[in-house]
Amino acid sequence: MLVKDIMTKEVITVKEEATVSEVVRILLGNRISGVPVVDDKDELSGIVSEADLIYRERNIHLPTFITIMDGVIFLESMKKVEDQLRKMTGYVVKDIMTKPVITVTEDTSVEEAARIMMDKNVNRVPVVRDKKIVGIVTRADILKAIAD
């Protein structure tokens, strides 16, 4: 069985400039836990999930550092801290979305899609053709396929 046989073809998406509150309303209103993000060309650019939204409520991890002669040397990447701050304070989707996005094609087997979801710990994978979203497969879709 292939992904095209079980995917949801009418995919709800949001634009990069959508606000965080708009995304929350979309997720709750449609009873979904994540939504792909598209750019102005309707090409996939990221994904926003409940985890990205809940991330805003966590405490920031400050990197380990040492001081030498009144100077500070960080022992961890400051990029990680910058990414955390961006996600925690973001107002629009492009600031909080996860990228790059793990994707599959229509001809990917359902077994491979399931393996990808488990290995990458994701609940959904957009199905793309030429950078455009043609569907989405969730863990629930895979469970339905198994049940049938």
Image: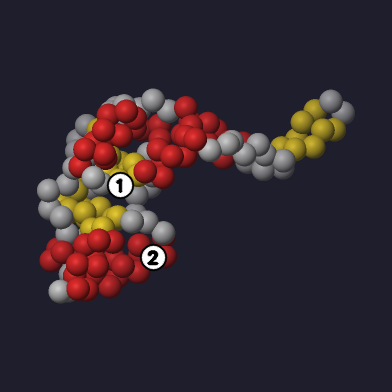
Numbered disc 1: secondary structure: loop
What label does residue 118 carry, if any?
Answer: 2
What label does residue 79 carry, if any?
Answer: none
**Distance between the Cα atoms at labels 2 and 1?**
17 Å
Query: Based on the displayed image, in which of its 4 quarters is residue 138 positioned?
Result: bottom left
What label does residue 33 carry, if any?
Answer: 1
Question: Can residue 108 be spotted in the picture?
Answer: no
Residue visible at 15% across and 51% down? 134
Density class for disc 2 (Cα within 10 Å; few <14, some 14-19, many ≥20) is: few
Name the foreground residue: 132 vs 148: 148
Query: Which of the two discs, 2 and 1, sits closer to the camera?
Result: 1
User: Is residue 86 found left or right of 99 in the rendered image?
Assistant: right
Name the foreground residue: 74 vs 146: 146
Q: Position of residue 60 (x, y in %)?
A: 59, 36
Q: Earlier in the sequence, mark 2 or mark 1?
A: 1
Name the foreground residue: 15 vs 105: 15
Residue visible at 30% across and 47% down? 33
Q: Position of residue 77 (x, y in %)?
A: 63, 41
Residue type at numbered disc 2: Met
Residue type at numbered disc 1: Ser
